[in-house]
Amino acid sequence: MNKRRFGRTGWEVSEVGFGAWAIGGSWGDVSEDGAKAALHAALDAGVDFLDTADVYGDGRSERIIRDVLRERGGARPVVATKAGRRLTPHVADGYTRANLEAFVDRSLANLGVDALDLVQLHCPPTEVYYRPEVFDALDRMVATGKLRHYGVSVEKVEEALKALAYPNVASVQIIYNLFRQRPAELFFREARAKDVAVIVRVPLASGMLTGKMSAGSTFAADDHRSFNRHGEAFDVGETFSGVPYDVALAAVEELRGLVPGEATMAQFALRWILTDEAVSVVIPGAKDRAQAEANAAAGGLPPLTADALDRARAVYRERIAPHVHQKW
């Protein structure tokens, strides 16, 4: 497994991490045994960066990570979690020191640790990025030893750029994939200049970029690909990267011809993300052992050809950008 610097934290982490949303909830039925098997497979393959959140299965994802790491013993991976989405309503005024401390304390208990490696504000309202007192509260938790580092998870490039203005933001998590290429225009360059780590989420556009979906695909009622198609529950950009389903299917068919013979389409999509050196880690999810192993192997693919990169950009520009580029 190749390693990359994680900004200015001093960490080096596997370039392919493990996104633990799917083992928490909102992705259909995932048994606890299946979730643990997926996590074990990722760790066995050299993955040492895990990303979760306090709301994934109401803490289930954090607790599964705790149990697996206790079972394995030895060197611990970096475990990043998130805070803020437990607020009801989810508004900027809820991002108070007291609320953030309560969320952090709950994650400390769920993960069974004395300090969180990295806590990220979980896609807060844009107004939060214009409230220095929120970041002061995080600074205080670092000073008291509850956090080692903190960062943000964002919906919009605007938010990512604003977050870079806070000197102790160690990382920014953002959607970046073959269907969401805007972060590479400006944000990546600015993040590298400030030595801020970039965590790439939704790398497979909710599974669309696996190439396994069709017009007839169906999803369980508790799967966000069923209940959030139009942003009914949270930002629509989190589901299929905000691309209309039929448009995405057509683009996938065009991209399919770029996949090298030794790779799956999902591995091609992950390897495309890793082409940019600004990316510190990409965090695909996995619901079983086979998916976790295949994801981890993506970093070992040869670099993509210049022709494949050019054609992938053309598909985005012609088919996808009109639907998403200026929204996020």
Image: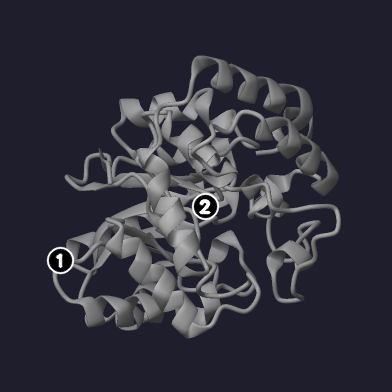
The local secondary structure at tag 1 comes to: loop
The local secondary structure at tag 2 comes to: helix
**Which quadrant holds residue 300?**
top left
Q: Position of residue 133 (x, y in %)?
A: 40, 55
Q: Residue at x 42, y 35 (%)?
A: 274
- Viewer-nearest of discs 2 and 1: 1
Left or right: residue 90 versus residue 317 is: left
Mark drawn on residue 243? none
**Which quadrant holds residue 192?**
top left
Q: Residue at x 55, y 56 (%)?
A: 124
Give the residue at mark 2. 128
| Relative depth, front residue between 148 and 23 | 23
Q: Is residue 102 visible?
A: no
Q: What residue type is disc 2 on? A: Val
Mark drawn on residue 75? 1
Left or right: residue 41 versus residue 235 is: left
